[in-house]
């Protein structure tokens, strides 16, 4: 390569790296806001509006209904639109939705109905942002940098879980939970800034057929996932894991607030243990994959729910301490799974199909979250009425963990278990 060519390549690489940092830092701030909302929305429902188990489960369900309802058409339509404007609009709408809550408190008009509406609106535009960002990253980074880029995004996601719950607890103590949700709304402006500061023009994605209908594009995405020997088991495993772990997560705050009698700040501190482990997992995900192979690593991550079978230890040991330990062990593996599966999908799916395939996979494995939230709320209500709060909630957490563990068995029985990495030569026969 000539000197001029080398300088041009270096300048291009520097621009790409700078653009990725802008996107990464902006999204990192908004991820913290997401985690604050995940903690403070049910906290407002439980402590301020005195919502019951079914209402808390319904709130979680409403916030996650958008993917099963809109994921497939959103993925198909975004393939033909620029991703960056879609990301900006999604962030601005979510900002406005969360800012409406402290305004309602100021007017003394906050109700559970408004919480449901805010959760639903935020969920819809989270779908738009998720699909747009996941399909934009392969356009921004060269293929050899995708694994590193996804690992960094998972690191930010893990750090946000570390900061989100304790920050939400602190803000709830000093500003009220509604004030914490207002601060969360403002965090989306950081993501807007990061996206708008990207200098490289967004490249156009080649589309197979400019006249292809949305329904046909949806059908193509479903067909690719259904017939792919790697994508199908991973998608089903993620769905099973999400269903079980949503039961656990829905009931966990009830367990901390009711029989364990923790304050919002104390509950946030307990949940931070899982976030510490998630940060550690994100830092080590490429090392785990390099040492044990991608397939073996994904099998192990699928078994994380088994640790919640030890929840009855809280009957004889200090409850918060037991939850801290179980959260730490369980949460270590989630970022490892996410980074591995995302990179694998981006590596084997052609760019012109990635939007619809990503939306299909995410729709399937996230559609079970509202079902898990409703199931967790209903199980918690029934078992608590029959056995008392402590025993009933513990039993519900155990059931959720047991269901989640089945995801490891799905991966173990598939071709995924033999993969060494996301650039394994065997991947060329997958799609």
Image: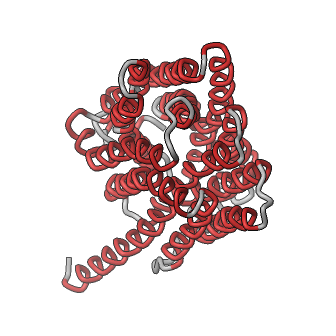
Taking the spot 32% from the left edge, 27% from the top edge, the residue there is: 418
The extreme bottom residue here reads 4
Taking the spot 54% from the left edge, 51% from the top edge, the residue there is: 354
Q: Who is closer to the viewer here, 86 or 304?
A: 304
Q: Is residue 304 left or right of residue 71?
A: left
Q: Who is closer to the viewer here, 200 or 245?
A: 245
- Residue 48 position within the rendered picture, expressed as x and y whole percent measured from the top left: 67, 49
- Residue 431 position within the rendered picture, expressed as x and y whole percent measured from the top left: 49, 38
Callout count: 0
* Location of residue 357 (image quadrant): top right
Q: Who is closer to the viewer here, 155 or 11?
A: 155
Q: Who is closer to the viewer here, 402 or 45?
A: 45
Taking the spot 67% from the left edge, 31% from the top edge, the residue there is: 371
Q: In this view, does 87 lie to the left or right of 117?
A: left
Q: How is the image coloured?
A: secondary structure
Q: Is residue 414 visible?
A: no
Q: Compared to 264, does 141 lie above or below? A: below
Taking the spot 56% from the left edge, 72% from the top edge, the residue there is: 189
| Quarter of the figure with the N terminus | bottom left
Q: In this view, does 282 lie to the left or right of 349?
A: left
- Residue 99 position within the rendered picture, expressed as x and y whole percent measured from the top left: 67, 67
Q: Compared to 332, does 164 lie above or below? A: below
- Residue 363 position within the rendered picture, expressed as x and y whole percent measured from the top left: 63, 41
Q: Is residue 42 visible?
A: yes
């Amino acid at each position: 390569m000539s000197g001029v060519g080398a300088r041009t390549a270096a300048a291009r690489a520097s621009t790409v790296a700078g653009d990725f940092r802008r996107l990464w830092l902006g999204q990192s701030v908004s991820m913290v806001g997401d985690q604050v909302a995940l903690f403070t929305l049910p906290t407002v429902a439980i402590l301020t509006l005195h919502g019951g188990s079914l209402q808390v489960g319904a709130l979680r369900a409403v916030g996650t209904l958008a993917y099963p309802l809109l994921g497939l058409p959103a993925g198909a339509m975004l393939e033909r639109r620029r991703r960056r404007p879609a990301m900006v609009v999604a962030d601005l709408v979510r900002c406005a939705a969360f800012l409406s809550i402290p305004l309602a408190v100021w007017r003394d008009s906050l109700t559970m109905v408004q919480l449901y509406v805010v959760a639903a609106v935020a969920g819809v535009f989270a779908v738009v942002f998720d699909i747009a960002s996941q399909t934009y990253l392969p356009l921004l980074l060269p293929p050899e940098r995708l694994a590193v880029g996804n690992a960094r995004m998972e690191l930010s996601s893990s750090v946000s879980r570390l900061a989100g719950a304790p920050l939400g607890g602190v803000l709830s103590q000093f500003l009220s939970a509604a004030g914490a949700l207002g601060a969360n709304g403002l965090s989306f402006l950081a993501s807007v800034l990061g996206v708008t500061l990207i200098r490289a023009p967004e490249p156009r994605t080649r589309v197979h057929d400019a006249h292809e209908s949305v329904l046909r594009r949806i059908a193509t995405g479903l067909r690719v996932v259904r017939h792919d020997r790697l994508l199908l088991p991973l998608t089903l495993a993620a769905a099973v894991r999400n269903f079980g772990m949503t039961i656990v997560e829905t009931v966990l705050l009830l367990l901390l607030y009711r029989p364990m009698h923790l304050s919002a700040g104390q509950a946030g501190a307990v949940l931070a243990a899982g976030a510490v482990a998630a940060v550690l997992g994100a830092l080590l995900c490429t090392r785990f994959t390099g040492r044990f192979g991608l397939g073996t690593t994904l099998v192990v991550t699928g078994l994380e729910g088994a640790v919640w079978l030890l929840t009855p230890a809280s009957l004889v040991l200090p409850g918060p301490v037991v939850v801290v330990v179980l959260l730490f062990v369980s949460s270590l593996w989630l970022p490892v799974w996410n980074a591995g599966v995302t990179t694998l999908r981006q590596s084997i799916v052609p760019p012109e199909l990635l939007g619809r395939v990503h939306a299909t996979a995410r729709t399937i494995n996230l559609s079970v979250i509202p079902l898990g939230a409703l199931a967790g709320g209903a199980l918690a209500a029934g078992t608590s009425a029959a056995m008392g709060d402590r025993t009933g909630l513990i039993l519900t957490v155990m059931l959720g963990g047991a269901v989640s563990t089945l995801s490891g068995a799905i991966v173990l029985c598939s071709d995924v278990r033999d993969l060494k990495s996301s650039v394994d030569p065997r991947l060329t026969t997958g799609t």
